[in-house]
Image (spheres, rainbow, N blue to C red):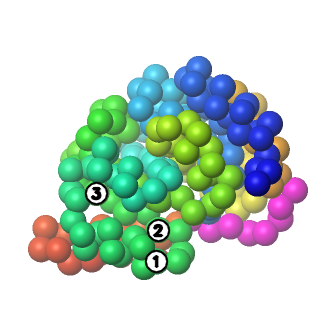
Amino acid sequence: MFLHHADINACLTTLEQGGLILYPTDTVWGIGCDATNAKAIDKIFALKKRVESKAMIVLMEQEADLLNYVQDHSLQIFDYIKGVHKPTTVIYSKGKNLPINLLSADGSIAIRICKDPFCKSLIKQFGKPIVSTSANISGYPTPLCFRDISLDIIEGVDYVVEHKQEDTEIKLPSAIVKWDENGQLIIIRA
């Protein structure tokens, strides 16, 4: 299946070199980097003019990948992920094998299993999770399609994906959920 090989290859090269990409996700356009590269993560904070205490989302290709990056392997969470159809980010209480600047102050990490074919292919070929944070300067509205992204962001990344730039369909951020210490589901953003 042809899946924008030139874009994928350019993204892979950029990610492997510690660079930033601007890419369409299963929700809004995102700024991404290698989620295991602390220096690349710092570049995103600088580009977004974002305080480092504000966490970012990590995209993974499949549920099995969670075993390498979170300490909570509750079957309840895996069952929930398989049952949702809307893109949903889950906050896990304890991340592992990720740079400290990607984790929240309490050690938690926000992860979404990406269902978009382009992103899944990119993450699979890269072999590691990818950061995804909205393509805006901190404090400004989240762009709902490519044409809404500011020039500061476009010029501040190392590679801009061509795939879906002409798409004018309005995309919304993911739902965000977590489980409390009693095993109760908390919906943070529906």
Report if the CB atoms under discs 1 and 3 are less than 8 Å apart: no
Residue positioned 41% across, 32% down in the render: 36
Is residue 142 inside the magenta stretch?
Answer: no
Helix, strand or loop status at disc 2 = strand
Residue appearing at x 80%, y 36% in the figure: 6
Q: Which mark is residue 44?
A: none
Q: Nearest the camera: 52 or 72?
A: 72
Q: CA distance from mark 3 to mark 2?
A: 13 Å
| Residue 88, numbered label | 2
Name above or below for residue 109 compared with residue 144: above
Q: Callout 2, which amino acid?
A: Thr
Q: CA distance from mark 2 to mark 1?
A: 7 Å
Q: Residue furthest right?
A: 166
Find numbered disc 1 in the image and state the secondary structure of the residue it sits on. loop
- Chief SS of the magenta region: loop
Could you tell me the amino acid type at mark 1? Val
Q: Is residue 110 visible?
A: no
- Seen at 59% across and 39% down, the residue is 125
Look at the image and tell me whether residue 120 can be seen: yes
Residue 34 screen position, x and y as percent: 50, 33
Secondary structure beneath dot 3 equals: strand
Residue position marked by numbered label 3 in the rendering: 92
